[in-house]
Image (cartoon, helix red, strand yellow):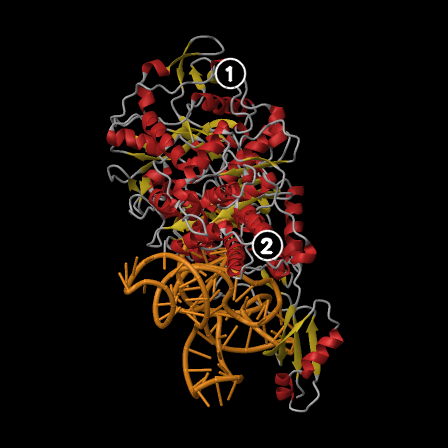
Amino acid sequence: MNDRGERFNPTSYERAWRDRWEADDLYRASDDDTRDKFYLLTMYPYPSGDLHIGHWYAQTGPDTVARMRRMQGYNVMLPMGFDSFGLPAENAAIDRGMDPAVWTYANIDRMRAQFRSMGDMYDWSREVVTSDPEYYRWTQWLFVQFFRAGLAYRAMAPVDWCPKDKVVLAREQVEGTDRHCWRCGTPVIKRDLEQWFFRITRYADELLDFSGIDWPEPIRLMQTNWIGRSEGAEIDFAAEADGVAPIRVFTTRPDTIFGATFMVLAPEHAAVAALTAPDRAAEVEAYVATARRETEIERMSTERERNGVFIGAYAVNPMTNERIPIWIADYVLPGYGTGAIMGVPAHDDRDYDFARRYDLPIRFVVAPRGGSASAGEAPGEAFLPHTDDEVLIESGEFTGMSAAEGIAAISACLAERGQGGPSVSYKIRDWLVSRQRYWGAPIPIVYCDEHGAQPVPEDQLPVLLPRDVDFVPTGVSPLQSHPEFLAASCPVCGAAARRETDTMDTFVDSSWYFLRYCSPNEETRPWDPEVVSRWMPVDLYAGGAEHAVLHLMYSRFFVKALRDMGHLDFNEPFTALRNQGQILGADHQRMSKSRGNVVNPDELVARYGSDTVRCFLMFIGPWDQGGPWNPTGIEGIHRFLSRVWAVAQASGSGGADESAAQPLRRLAHRTIRDVGIDYEAFHFNTALSKLMELTNALGRARDDGLAGTDAYGKTVETLLLLLAPIAPHIAEELWTRRGRPYSIHQQSWPDFDPALAAAEVIELPVQVDGKLRDKLVVAPGTPAEEIERLALASEAVQRYLNGRAPRRVIQVPGKMVNIVTPD
RNA sequence: GCCGGGGUGGCGGAAUGGCAGACGCGCCGGACUCAAAAUCCGGUGAGCGCAAGCUCGUGUGGGUUCGACUCCCACCCCCGGCACCA
C-alpha cells in the first residue's frame, strides 16, 4: 500500500462482480416496467465450439450502448441465445461419431460460460436455443401457418446431387469451380427434386420500401439489388408452327422492338420440344443436354462466349410482322422473366455478341436526337440508349419518340392488341427452405395417398427429431431410414401416411428468434402478443453485414407475412441497424479453424482482465470498420485503466485550491457531453480517447496537489460513470471503494452544464493567404471587429502584409481568421 | 463488368470546408533504482536551418474556394457484395 492505493489487479475483483450482478438479477428486463423500453438485439451465434475474439468485438459495442441507455433511464432488454441447428453438428456426427445434440449442447455450455466472462448485461432468463423442442415446436407451428396461408408450397427444383454418395448436397457442400462433392470429390450433377419454398416473392415490392427504418445505406442497396425489380413489358410473338401458343418474352426496352431480329429461348423453355424442326432435333437435344449438365458457375460465367443453336422455327415480330428465327442459348435463364427474349443486337451487348457470332441482322432503331446514325451499318459495338437525347428511328408510327415515350406508347399499343403490355420482373426467387439433412427442425408435413401433403395438426407438435439414428454415411438422410419416424397417419382420414423427412433451413429458425425473446417461456403459443407488442420492434440491431440479404431479409419477410396473418401489429422487425466490421486474422484472412488464425480471447482475459480486452477491442479503430488482429497496444489500454485506478484512489490533504481545479471541472463537463455523443454513434474509439484525456488531466491535477478538492472528487466520479458502460468491472470496483452505493450500473447517466462544457477561451488560428501564421487567444463572443484589429496587429501578420492593406479579411466565428493579401 | 466501402506519420487511427496527425502503440532522451522491471516526465511527419523560422506533406492528376484529407471531374490500388437478370 502507498498513498495511491493498492496495485491495479483486475482478476482480484472482476469475477466477483459478475457473480454478484448475476445473483442480484441486475439485468433482468421486466415486461411490466413503465419506463420507455429499449430492445437491443445482437446476432445470436452458432455454437461452433469456442468464442473467438470476433464475438467479443461484436458484442462489446452493443453492450456499451445498452448500459448507457439503461443509465439514461430506459428499460433495456439485451437477450442472448444460440442458433443451434445446422450442418457442423451433423458433420461432427459423421466424422467423429458424436451425437449432434450432445456435441451442440456441450458447445453451448462452454460458450455460455465464455459469454459470461465478457461482463455483458445479458438477460439470460430469456435465453433461446433453437434446437430445443420447446423452440422448434413453434418454428414448426409457424411453418403450418405459412402453409395454410399459401405462403409455403412444394415444387420441383434442381438440387446438387453427388452421384457417388447418392446424397443431396447443400450449396456450401459443393466446392471449387469444377463443383465437386466436399466429401468424396466427385463432380456433382443437377437433379430435380420436390422442395419446399416460402413465397417471399409475394413481398418483393414491400421489401423494397425502407421508409421508417434507420438502416445502413449499403445494406439497403444490397437488398434492393438482390430483389432486382425491373420494369418493362411482356410481348407475345406468334410462333410459326401449328398448335403452338405465342411465345411471350420479357424486355425492359419494348421501345426497341423494331430492332428485334431474332428470338432466344432458354434451353429449358417448355416450347422448345414442340418448336424444334426435325432436321434440327439432334443438335438441339445435344445442346439442351449439355446445358442441363452444366454447372451453375460455368453457365453464370460472364467470361465465356455466348453460344446457342437455331431450332429451325420462326416467330413473328408483332410490330414489324417479320419472320425472325428462334434460337436457344444458355445465356437466357429459365428462371427470370419468361425464359425467352427478343434479340435486339443493336441495343444490347449480349444480343450483339450473339448476332455477330451467328451472323444475324443488326438493325438500329434508336439514334441520338439530331444525329445522323443510319440503320443497317455495322456498328463498332452495341449502344444502349438511356436518355431523352435519343429518339426512335425506323420504328413506324413511333419514330421520333424519345425512349421513355416509346416504352409507354409501344407497351400501351401491345396491351390494346392483346399481345402483352407493361410488366415487372424481379431477380429474387422464392426461398427454398427444405434441407435433406438431419440436424434441423423437421418440416411438419405428412403425405397421404388420398389427401396429399397435409400439415401436422398443431396439437401434435412438435414433430420430434429422433435421437436414435445412425450417422454412418449411407447416402440418405438418417431420417429416411428411421421407420418409427416415417410412420404417421393422415390428419384428414387417419390412414397410414408417410412423414416428410426434410428439415428446415436454419434461417427459418433465426427469422423469429427476436419474437421468442419477448416471452421465451410461453407453452401454449409462440409468444404472448401483448408482450411482443410492448417490446417489438427491436430498437437497435447490431451484427455483421454478411447477413445483408439472407437473415435480414428473411426476418423482414416473416414479420410482414405474420402481420398479414394477424399475428403481429407492426411492419418491420428492426427499427435501427448497425453493422460491425470484421476482425480478421493476423494474416488478413477471415478467421477460421482450418487456417489456424483464430484468436481465442480467454488467455488475454486471464492476463489482462475483461475490461482491458473490452476497451482494447473498442479502441483499435471505428467499430464498423474492423481489421486484422494485432494485439500490439493492449498494454497501452491496460496502462490507461491502471491510471484510472490510481487517480480514483488518490487522496489529498485539505486546504486545496478549489479555483485551481476549475479547468478540470470544465473538462469533465465537456467529456460528459462528448462521450455520450460518441457512444450513441458507436464511436467507441474516440470516446475512449476522451476518457484518456480526462484521466490524464486528473493525473496532472493530482500531481499539482488538487486531489483534495471537491472538483477532483466529482471528476473522478464522472469518469467512473462514463467508463461504466465500456469497462463495467473497474467502474463498479472503484465506485464502491469510494463508498458510493452499489451498483454504479443503476446510477443515472451524468448531466453536463452547457456553460461549463463550453470553452472558456478560444485559441483562434490566424492565417495569411490560407497559411497559419499566428494564434490569438480570445474570450468566446469577442466582436469580429476586435478580432480583426488584434489579427492585423499581430507581428507575424504585419511581416507578411509588409505595409500593405489587406485585400480581404475572412472570419469564421470561433474558428479562424484569414487575411488575404493584395494581388 | 456493375454496385458499395476505403486509401492520412514507423503502426492503429483523429479531424467531413477552417490549426492535418487528437488518443494510443512503437521508438529516442531523462527521472527513480546498485541494476532491471514497473511507473513518471520530455521529444517524435519529412526536408532545410545554430536559431527564430521556412518549405513540403492526407493514393495520382486536374478543378472549385480566401481556404480542400473533406466538395467536383478523371484515374490507380485495396476490401466487400452481385455477377449473362434481357
Task: Chain letter for mark 1, please.
Answer: A
Outermost residue to the top: A494
> Residue A234 location in percent, x, y?
58, 43
Q: Which numbered disc covers residue A709?
A: 2
Between residue A346 and residue B81, name the one nearer to us. B81
Distance from Cα at disc 2 to Cα at disc 1: 69 Å
Question: Which residue type carries mark 2?
Answer: Thr
User: Tag 2, which secondary structure?
Assistant: loop
Residue at image mark 1: A458
Between residue A299 and residue A363, name the one nearer to us. A299
Which residue corresponds to the image point at 48% horizontal and 8% vertical from the top-left?
Answer: A493
Q: Is residue A681 above or below residue A550?
A: below
Compared across the picture, whether A752 is left or right of A597 comes to right
Compared across the picture, whether A291 is left or right of A657 comes to left
Badge 2: residue crowd in 10 Å (few <14, some 14–19, many ≥20)? many
Between residue A704 and residue A589, name the one nearer to us. A704
Q: Is residue A769 above or below residue A129?
A: below
Between residue A704 and residue A125, name the one nearer to us. A704
Which residue corresponds to the image point at 30% horizontal and 20% vertical from the top-left?
Answer: A469
